[in-house]
Amino acid sequence: MSMRTRLAPALADTHLDGETKVTDRSAAPEGTGSIKVSGVGYGYPGVRTGQRVIDDLEFSVRPGEFVCIVGPSGCGKTTLLKLLSGLIAPEAGSILVNDEAVSGPPENLGFVFQDHGRALLPWRNAVRNVEFSLEAARVPRRRRKDMARDALRRVHLPDVENLYPAQMSGGMQQRLQIARALAATPSVLLMDEPFAALDALTRFALEDALLEVWQELGLTVVFVTHDLDEAIYLADRVIVLRRGPAHVVREVRVDLERPRDQGRTRAEKDFVALRYELFETIRTL
Amino acid sequence: MSRTASGLTAAIRSSLLGLVGVAGLTAVWAGAVAGGLIDGVPSPAEVFPALTDQLQASELWRATGHTLGMTAAATAIATVVAVLLGTAVGMSAAMDRLLGSTINTLRFVPPVALIPVVLLLMGFGPGSEIAVGAFAALWPVLLNVASATSDLRHRFEDMTKIERLNPVRKLVTVYVPGALPATITGVRLAAALALILVVAIEMLAVPQGLGHQLRFAGDALQLPTMYAYILWTGVVGLLLNTVLLAGERRLRWT
Ligand SMILES: Nc1ncnc2c1ncn2[C@@H]1O[C@H](COP(=O)(O)OP(=O)(O)OP(=O)(O)O)[C@@H](O)[C@H]1O
Ligand SMILES: [Mg+2]
């Protein structure tokens, strides 16, 4: 039986009760939301055969953890997310999501693409775009609308139900994409530089909306970014990859107090120290 | 002023401009005939009364009905075949490799070149009209559907995998709604081509419809009537395009 369908009623019910606090994850099986990558290698077929983009990659993510991945452009971050989501299969090593070997996209996994144009259907309005993923997850029709509205509300997009993606700003479309990824209550959410194309203020607002949702739903998040400040602000742990072939060079725990605050957190001594440390690491890559 | 009202004024203004164009061209035509610049062409003063006469005769309307019926049948058959083939080619790289080169060869065969063959196979009747019209009408729909579907396949490849859509669901929720606007544009272009080919085969071989009336008037040396039919065929094409364009605008999501 699927996580998605099991968690779905819990989310819908909390909405109907007008209660928005933590979704009950105690019913979830052991290992739900965990990720384990061991000895993973991958090279794109036909491109400089034998040369791997990723080699001997090793890390794991605890259930409910927020992990950010940083690394130079072209080092293989998107490739890594494609491997984690089962869009491509590793040549070597193993990937476990929810304690199960990944062979194709797992049921309870959400993916937020860097480019919302590759995710949102232009002929569906906002609420119907969210419902798309509920239809795909076989959520019964009568519950879809409520769950879709609930997801839109979580990303602070309440009054746009009838707008089409083309009628929304870039930030709104990215929120919509996140709402859709969340609607079917995944246990793992993978995000590929989701805020890279946005202005600073929109970005801050979306970061906070994401942290709020993450805490409410108890998701596991793997978030790729090239922005060190963003990584430190969001994460429990920052993983630094290096290029050619990609592997982990550094892992840094972020123990900054939660809930975080854009102004206060970024001014904290520890934040500044972490940023200095990470910057020095990346600069030598 | 409301938006629809200003839209209406704009529409009226653009039709007025169109009429000015027609009037200008008619004036040039009348001048050229009167000045003896072109020979063997009747003047507008002869053609327009001939057209009014014909508009009151039942043959013109029967011929128009026949030609439009053949055009509609040809377009409908072509659309069904083209949507099926185009979706298959657009959805699957294997189908594209299998059929792509055949399609790209056949689409450069001029439909008129098929007329003799089709006449031999199907005789001098409506069947031949529909077959030749459908052959011409096939390509715009097929190419539009195939390229729209293939764009959708690449654009939403990862997303549809993440959502774990099976092929049927992918077809119904992504390809069909996504390719609809391009399909409708293809149908509009296809109908215009079908009309041209249907009229051509009627002129050459099938003794029915507008093409036949046109040819018949010419053979009888009733030149004003022949030109009246030429004009009328143009008007029919224009109306057909306008109707389909209006339908296309209603169905578009972009
Ligand atoms: N489809 C593909 N076919 C062949 N090579 C590819 C493909 N996609 C990516 N690569 C190569 O793999 C390497 C890693 O690419 P990837 O997109 O994972 O990098 P990235 O870390 O996400 O970069 P960025 O930060 O710029 O998004 C690059 O060298 C790239 O050229
Ligand atoms: Mg990338």
Image (tube, helix red, strand yellow):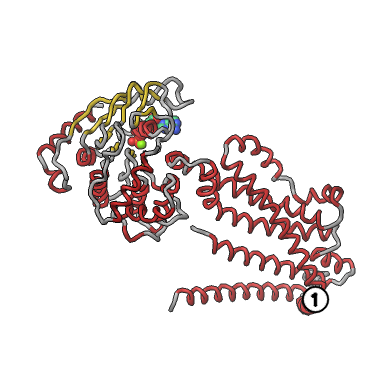
Q: Name which residue lies at 74% across and 67% down.
A: B233
Which amino acid does the dot numbered 1 rest on?
A: Gln
Q: Position of residue A223 (x, y in %)?
A: 29, 38
Determine if residue A165 is in view. no
Determine if residue B15 is in view. yes
Q: Callout 1: few (<14), some (14-19), or many (20+) C-alpha neighbours within 10 Å?
A: some
Q: Position of residue B166 (x, y in %)?
A: 51, 41
Q: Position of residue B158 (x, y in %)?
A: 44, 39
Q: Position of residue A68 (x, y in %)?
A: 26, 36
Ligand 2, by image quadrant, is top left
Image check: B233 left or right of A113? right
**Vertically, is B53 above or below B65?**
below
Name the residue beneath numbered marker 1: B54
Image check: B133 left or right of A200? right
Q: Residue furthest left?
A: A269
In the figure, residue A105 lies in which quadrant?
top left
Instruction: Name the chain letter of the residue that bears numbered label 1.
Output: B
